[in-house]
């Protein structure tokens, strides 16, 4: 049974509790626009359970990508630095004097005049002989490192170096910022990882602000930018490709719930009451991306989202996603596999032209298709 978070604002709530809540988040909104069946339903709790029962589950699809792992680590480092060392550890290379392959272990046993297993013996037997002889084998070191890691995520030396450089860039004081750092200007005076839960038109919703300030939201994004591409242009392309504007629209809708939640006393976790009173609940929140290019030498920019036309289009798409959710839920319920309800599709000249395809790509979803 899923534990529901109470409707309201949650400070200091663990990300796992936020993820487990069945409310629709911005990722769900994007998935519903892309494909209600495979984009959204099969990744729900019931969807995963039924897919597994049908023998259609793909365990690898549930594993986070390398980009997601790095992005999550960057979030932890900048937004929850006190927890970073509890969550991550740098990979260590085994010392050169540790024996590795069977042939190397055999050579070490020979030099030590120790018991030598038959040549046909498996590597495990050679490892046991080496341990009895007091020799260092890589298996011992791997076991020791696993114990040292203690369940933490192991990051490569290169990734750790990039994270340290990102942290330096964000915290170094800059003349163009009046002697302040990006961190001081953007990631102080507020609260990180704030969850909002609300109901909208009978549908449960959720959002999680990376960093909440009294006047708006700071959203941290990492992205990969090739050396021959201008970073800001690359990031703005990511805004369209990954629908970051749609996410901003959803979170701005969550901001509208703050006033009601505060007035009703639906505020959970540790937060300064004086700070809470200063939150501009009646104003449109400012939205700023901290965009971190993570390839090679990291680059960090802060970019304000001020595009009313894009926001208006995102609002319409968000409403389409919610209607899609309601229609499919009413038709199939929670325990029956969802089946596409696209109906008849006509591929006309407009939809097959390059400009038509581009418009549909910008529309981000099957709801842009109309039945003749």
Image (spheres, rainbow, N blue to C red):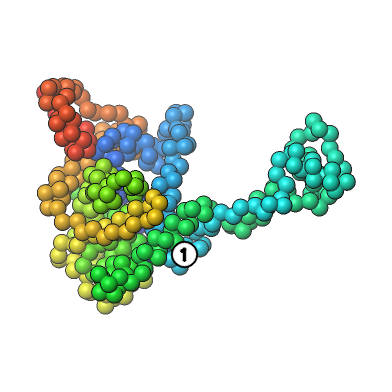
Q: Can you give x and y, in whole percent of width and height, for residue 344 in the image?
A: 19, 22
Q: Can you give x and y, in whole percent of width and height, for residue 313 in the image?
A: 14, 45
Could one spot residue 11 in this view of the protein? Answer: no
What residue do we see at 51% from left, 52% from top? 156
What residue do we see at 17% from left, 22% from top? 347
Residue, far front: 228
The C terminus lies in which quarter of the figure? top left
Q: Can you give x and y, in whole percent of width and height, for residue 263 in the image?
A: 21, 69
Could one spot residue 365 in this view of the protein? Answer: yes
Q: Judge by depth and name the residue closer to the eye, 321 or 218.
A: 218
What residue do we see at 35% from left, 31% from top? 337
Q: Judge by depth and name the residue closer to the eye, 295 or 281.
A: 295
The local crowd at label 1, few if under 14, some if 14 to 19, many if 20 or more residues have their Cα within 10 Å, is few
Vertical arrangement, residue 217 with respect to residue 244, above or below: below
- Asked which quadrant contains residue 80, the reply is bottom left
Left or right, 224 with respect to 232, comes to right
Vertical arrangement, residue 226 with respect to residue 178, above or below: above
- Asked which quadrant contains residue 174, the reply is bottom left
Where does label 1 land, which residue?
Answer: 83
């Amino acid at each position: 049974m899923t534990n529901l978070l109470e409707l309201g604002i949650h400070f200091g709530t663990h990300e796992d509790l936020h993820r487990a809540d069945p409310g629709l988040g911005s990722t769900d909104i994007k998935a519903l626009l892309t494909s209600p069946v495979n984009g959204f339903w099969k990744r729900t709790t019931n969807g995963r359970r039924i897919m597994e029962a049908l023998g259609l589950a793909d365990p690898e699809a549930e594993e986070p990508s390398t980009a997601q792992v790095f992005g999550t680590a960057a979030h932890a480092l900048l937004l929850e630095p006190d927890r970073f060392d509890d969550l991550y550890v740098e990979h260590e290379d085994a010392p050169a004097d540790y024996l590795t392959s069977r042939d190397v272990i055999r050579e070490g046993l020979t030099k030590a005049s120790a018991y030598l297993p038959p040549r046909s013996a498996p590597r495990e037997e050679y490892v046991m002989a080496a341990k009895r002889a007091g020799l260092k084998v890589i298996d011992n070191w791997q076991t020791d490192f696993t114990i040292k890691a203690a369940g933490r995520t192991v990051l490569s030396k290169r990734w750790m170096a990039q994270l340290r450089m990102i942290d330096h860039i964000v915290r170094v004081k800059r003349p163009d910022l009046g002697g302040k750092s990006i961190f001081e200007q953007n990631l102080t005076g507020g609260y990180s990882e704030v969850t909002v839960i609300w109901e909208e038109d009978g549908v449960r919703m959720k959002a999680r602000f990376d960093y909440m300030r009294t006047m708006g939201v700071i959203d941290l994004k990492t992205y990969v930018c090739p050396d021959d591409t201008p970073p800001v242009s690359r990031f703005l392309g990511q805004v369209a490709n990954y629908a970051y504007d749609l996410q901003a629209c959803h979170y701005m809708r969550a901001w509208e719930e703050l006033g009601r939640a505060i007035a009703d006393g639906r505020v959970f976790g540790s937060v300064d009451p004086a700070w809470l009173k200063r939150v501009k609940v009646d104003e449109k929140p400012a939205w700023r991306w901290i965009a971190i290019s993570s390839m090679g030498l990291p680059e960090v920019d802060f970019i304000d989202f001020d595009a009313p036309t894009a926001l208006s289009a995102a609002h319409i798409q968000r409403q389409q996603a919610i209607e899609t959710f309601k229609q499919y839920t009413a038709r199939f319920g929670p325990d029956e596999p969802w089946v596409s309800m696209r109906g008849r599709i006509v591929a006309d000249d407009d939809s097959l032209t390059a400009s038509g395809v581009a418009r549909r790509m910008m529309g981000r979803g099957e709801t842009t298709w109309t039945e003749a």
